[in-house]
Amino acid sequence: MSEAGVQDVHIIGAGLAGSEAAFFLAERGITVTIHEMRPQTMTPAHSTGDCAELVCSNSFKSTNPNSAHGMLKTEMNEMGSLVLKTAPSVAVPAGDALAVDRKLFSEKITQALHTHPNISFFHEEASKPRRDKITLVATGPLTSPALAEWLAKITGNEDLYFYDAIAPIVEASSVDPLYSFSANRYDKGDEAAYLNCPMNKEQYEEFIDTLLTARCVPPRAFEKEKFYAGCQPIEAIAQTGRESLRFGPMKPVGLADPRTGERPHAVLQLRTENRSKTAFNLVGFQTKLTYGEQSRVFRRIPALRNAEFLRFGSIHRNTYVCGPRVLRPDLSVKGEPTVYLGGQITGVEGYLESAACGMLAAHFIYQRIREQPHDAPPADTTLGALLRHVTGAEEKNYQPSGMHFGLLDPLFFPDVTGLPKDVSRQKMADHARISFAKWWERMRARGD
Ligand SMILES: Cc1cc2nc3c(=O)[nH]c(=O)nc-3n(C[C@H](O)[C@H](O)[C@H](O)COP(=O)(O)OP(=O)(O)OC[C@H]3O[C@@H](n4cnc5c(N)ncnc54)[C@H](O)[C@@H]3O)c2cc1C
């Protein structure tokens, strides 16, 4: 057994990640102590003392096995996910999505954990993890200030963030090549890193009109409408003047449209999001527009008229670390060998992804307790792709991400190039299922 204590793991936070991790370990005979600060100390978004409370929507997204979230569900189900075992028993109708009665859902999870013989609870706020035991920190986007202070101390202030300012991501093949061109501003650099979406005056004016009248997500009571200068939502910039975006994120300087040889009136730049260039980020386009409005407004940009959005933009309070700089491949913290991070605090985003990340951390902790070598889900699975994001994404501009196809590197799916989207996604899902099943079978053979 490991040096850090025989079968005794501490988990701080009984949200989506902490609950999933506790169950995973407890089911394998590991004794788990959960430290959860609610209901004595509440976060600004939770309203009960229950475990795995869903603070906003009640949906775990698509169940279509060929969608990114459907693929993730398949893998989590194989690993015995408590969240996915519980959700169908309290499901409410939601088309092809898995949505639940949120009250019943968290009551059931709470009951499963409270009655588990290997789990004990302390309802207390932890200000730091214990170092003499393996501890999983799963305190989520609203981590209490005392623990955030400890995290800032060990990770360095510049590696702990308190706000998400996320720009949308579109699928590369859905950007119209007739209305876009590759170039770097002033032709700097050897390789063109940007895809530029030019607009003439009329198109820009129409875009501004649409943007200024679009609906935004109302701020939560605890989220002050105060943004850092560098991450202002585009609609807020546009409200300061019709030309503001042309002098900000849509400035056309240093760019010439090869179709006309002239500088466009305004330009949206797209930056490649992954090494395989299958997804592009709308540079500087963080926004609080509702998701529906984002498709409507951004499709007014000619190059994006048929854009498929892999992720929508958002801005909200969120505590998370720069995972790729701070974490080791097994989700333990560099320089703190007994401390692991799981859930949204690592830079995943979403209920399902947070639970998945908690499960991954628990899996690695279990490997360590059993003194088995590190063995992670392969990169051609959705769990593997999420893990690659939080431990291997580019450190600069690191942003939280939910599961989407852009996280799956096409290098691992060579046989889908050029196929229609539906066919290629079906093939990718089949490929991932086989790869995951093989890996999990190997883990089970070792006793996982
Ligand atoms: C306002 C808001 C709305 C969101 N809406 C959605 C949505 O609609 N859909 C979606 O998919 N995702 C949503 N998310 C994102 C995210 O997926 C969820 O927040 C998810 O619950 C994160 O899971 P987690 O386990 O990492 O954190 P949480 O589920 O938040 O769990 C963390 C737990 O740690 C506890 N805790 C914090 N600090 C301490 C401490 N020092 N000591 C002890 N306990 C502590 C908290 O009380 C909490 O129970 C939202 C996030 C926020 C902030």
Image: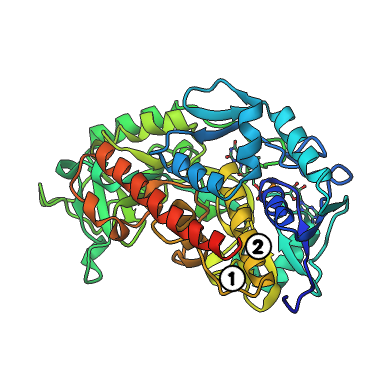
Is the CB–ligand 1 distance for label 2 below 8 Å? Answer: no
Q: Could you say where residue 145 lies in the image, as x and y percent from the top left?
A: 78, 57
- In this rendering, the answer to whether 88 lies above or below 156 is above
Toward the viewer: 187 or 205?
187
Toward the viewer: 331 or 373?
373
Q: Could you say where residue 240 lies in the image, as x and y percent from the top left?
A: 48, 39
Is the CB–ligand 1 distance for label 1 below 8 Å? Answer: no
Label ID, residue 341? 2
Label ID, residue 406? none
Question: Which residue is the extreme one toward the top?
Answer: 93
Disc on the earlier residue, 1 or 2: 1
Task: Tell me: 104 left or right of 388.
Answer: right
Asked if marks 1 and 2 touch (Cβ < 8 Å), the reply is yes
> Quarter holding the N terminus?
bottom right
Please tell me which residue is depicted at 71% across the width and 62% down the height of the picture.
136
How many circles with numbers are drawn on the protein? 2
Q: Could you say where residue 9 lies in the image, as x and y percent from the top left?
A: 77, 64
Q: Could you say where residue 234 lies in the image, as x and y percent from the top left?
A: 45, 42
Q: CA distance from mark 1 to mark 2?
A: 10 Å
Residue wearing tag 1: 326
Under mark 2, the amino acid is Leu
Q: Secondary structure at mark 1?
A: helix
Task: Bin the neighbour count of mark 1 within 10 Å (Cα to Cα): few under 14, some 14-19, many 20 and up.
Answer: many
Residue 426, visible in the rendered structure: yes
Toward the viewer: 223 or 76?
76
Please tell me which residue is depicted at 44% across the width and 43% down the height of the picture.
71
- In this rendering, the answer to whether 302 lies above or below 231 is above
Please tell me which residue is depicted at 86% across the width and 46% down the height of the picture.
41
Q: How is the image coloured?
A: rainbow
